[in-house]
Image (cartoon, grey):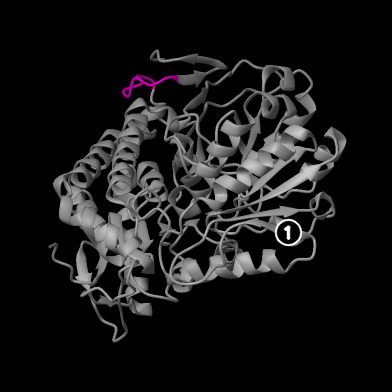
């Protein structure tokens, strides 16, 4: 068993100043695990922010290759965590070992991918406009631009991905890649997991010679407000509920110096079923969609919470098959009691709405989540009923039947911002779908064709973001290499001597990167 101290991580050391102690629990039994965690005091939160701020000048000034070595070392340490670690994560989350092993591979793979980006250098966004002293009526000065890290970043761990969206997950990896030290707020649902991963990050930092405060971690409830409001914190990364994310946004905006919050919050991820697709493979779609809805007990940010199709005999047959498949699905254990309680309330709200009918699923009771299927009147979506916009986090979905394409467009127009939107279609369906695609572009950060939204690939092209309330800032993504951009800002150097310029902008191009020079992309020296 790993050695769990339950103490906060501050400047490479451990701290336990407070008297409040919290415990993690076994997600399946509700039994408290034999570890105690010391809730951070306000002084400890301040010390963690100070440690990150002290580390920032040295860390951001490191060559990108050194930061890449750090990320690679974190990946190695994560991959080296043994079967006892996997078993602990399973106890804290009720997720199966295969899922945890896969998520660990995704997390370490993300670190290695970001390291590759750092060595490639394009994240720097180097641009050079050389002086034009002879230009009339006024000469142009020498102007050079590249990007640098914002400063210390506060990161809040997510409950549903204890590795990929938590301690060493996407927000932490993005901030560290950008040259920003991190203060991580451990999620209360998997504090043992957080400590094991934090130890791995610290070991990697020590092996690669990183400054002491490059990674810090605090425990406890209610400490996040101190962190977000701390004047040394320059940005926030968050994955969680709309209520929690919005609260952080409001806090950050109310600061004397407002700071950006990149929050991934709420999405119902509509799936649009086109007529010819239902004609050719309706049974298969019903089976596949069911699997997507109940995968991981529906505890995915991209879970398909809304299914829309045009009234037809094929749609009716599809719906009948979907009801049958959903009724066959077993109950599953959720991440924790709080998640189960929220799911039960969400299901109850749907059941009590006069415009929504219950089609499949057992009564929600006991300690497991029952898969559910509902059908809502299209008018509710068209009129913007708030209940249909709310994410029910768990294995449930709502079907909406529209009369024709015109009503389909009105229904989709009433949707708020989404992480994903999916089209299930045949080539014949797509012949007249340009307006539909254009509408979905306005609504979602990722549009899928003939796939299902659960599952997010970590790569250069991925977007895991979207218009509010899917995220607080639709200009970024929390998955994929573009996620690094959230924690960077541009700096322009005018008429600077070469010796004082960042390596990315020096005449000799010592990094060997591609740069935009006088409007042309080149890796040549000047």
Residue 240 location (% of width, % of height): 51, 59
Looking at the picture, how far across and down is residue 440, in whole percent? 71, 36
Q: Is residue 511 magenta?
A: yes
Q: Which residues are magenta?
A: 507-514
Residue visible at 27% across and 45% down?
A: 101
Residue 313 inside the magenta-drawn segment: no
On the picture, is 278 further left or further right than 452? Answer: right
What is the magenta segment's predominant secondary structure? loop
Q: Relative to 365, does residue 403 appear above or below in the rendering?
A: above
Q: Nearer the viewer, residue 270 or 327?
A: 327
Q: Residue at x 19, y 46 (%)?
A: 77
Left or right placement of residue 505 versus residue 319 in this view: left
Give the residue pinned by disc 1: 357
Q: Does residue 276 lie above or below 51 as drawn?
A: above
Q: Is residue 505 visible?
A: yes
Q: Quadrant of residue 286?
A: top right
Name the quadrant of the C terminus.
Answer: top left
Residue occupying image coordinates x 72% and y 61%: 387
Q: Nearer the viewer, residue 512 or 503?
A: 512
Image vertical order of residue 244 relative to residue 462, above or below: below
Dividing the image into 4 quarters, which one contains the N terminus?
bottom left
Task: Classify mark 1: residues with Cα within 10 Å, few (<14), some (14-19) or many (20+).
Answer: some
């Amino acid at each position: 068993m790993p050695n769990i101290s339950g103490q906060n991580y501050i400047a490479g050391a451990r701290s336990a100043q407070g008297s409040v102690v919290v415990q993690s629990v076994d997600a399946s039994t509700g039994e408290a695990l034999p570890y105690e965690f010391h809730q951070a005091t306000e002084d400890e939160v301040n010390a963690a922010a100070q440690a990150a701020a002290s580390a920032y000048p040295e860390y951001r000034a490191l060559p990108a290759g050194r930061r890449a070595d750090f990320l690679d070392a974190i990946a190695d340490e994560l991959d080296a965590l043994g079967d006892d670690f996997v078993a602990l994560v399973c106890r804290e989350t009720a997720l199966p070992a295969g899922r945890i092993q896969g998520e660990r591979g995704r997390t370490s793979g993300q670190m290695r991918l970001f390291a590759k980006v750092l060595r490639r250098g394009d994240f720097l966004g180097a641009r050079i406009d050389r002086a034009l002293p002879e230009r009339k009526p006024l000469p142009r000065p020498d102007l050079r631009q590249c990007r640098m890290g914002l400063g210390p970043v506060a990161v809040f761990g997510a409950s549903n991905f204890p590795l990929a969206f938590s301690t060493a997950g996407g927000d932490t990896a993005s901030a560290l890649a950008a040259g920003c030290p991190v203060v991580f707020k451990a999620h209360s649902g998997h504090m043992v997991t957080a400590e094991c991963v934090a130890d791995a990050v610290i070991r990697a930092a020590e092996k690669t010679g990183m400054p002491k405060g490059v990674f810090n971690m605090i425990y406890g409830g209610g400490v996040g407000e101190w962190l977000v409001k701390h004047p040394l914190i320059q940005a926030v990364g968050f994955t969680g509920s709309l209520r929690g994310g919005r609260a952080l946004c409001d806090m950050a905006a109310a600061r004397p110096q407002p700071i950006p919050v990149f929050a991934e919050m709420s999405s119902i991820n509509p799936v649009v079923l086109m007529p010819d697709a239902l004609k050719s493979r309706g049974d298969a779609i019903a089976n596949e969609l069911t699997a997507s809805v109940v995968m991981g007990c529906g505890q995915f940010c991209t879970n398909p919470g809304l299914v829309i199709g045009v009234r037809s005999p094929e749609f009716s047959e599809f719906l009948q098959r979907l009801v049958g498949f959903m009724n066959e699905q077993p109950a599953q254990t959720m991440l924790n009691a709080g998640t189960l309680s929220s799911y039960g309330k969400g299901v109850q709200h749907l059941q009590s709405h006069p415009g929504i009918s219950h089609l499949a699923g057992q009564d929600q009771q006991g300690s497991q989540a029952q898969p559910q299927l509902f059908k809502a009147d299209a008018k509710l979506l068209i009129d913007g009923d708030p209940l249909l916009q709310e994410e029910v986090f768990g294995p449930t979905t709502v079907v909406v039947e529209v009369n024709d394409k015109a009503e389909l467009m009105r229904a989709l127009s009433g949707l708020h911002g989404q992480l994903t939107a999916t089209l299930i279609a045949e080539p014949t369906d797509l012949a007249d779908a340009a307006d539909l695609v254009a509408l979905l572009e306005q609504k979602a950060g990722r549009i899928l064709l003939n796939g299902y939204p659960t599952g997010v690939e970590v790569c250069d092209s991925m977007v895991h973001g979207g218009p509010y309330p899917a995220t607080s800032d639709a200009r970024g993504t929390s998955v994929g290499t573009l996620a690094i951009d959230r924690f960077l800002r541009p700096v322009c150097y005018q008429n600077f001597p070469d010796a004082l310029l960042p390596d990315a902008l020096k005449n000799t191009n010592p990094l060997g990167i591609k740069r935009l020079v006088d409007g042309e992309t080149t890796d040549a020296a000047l």
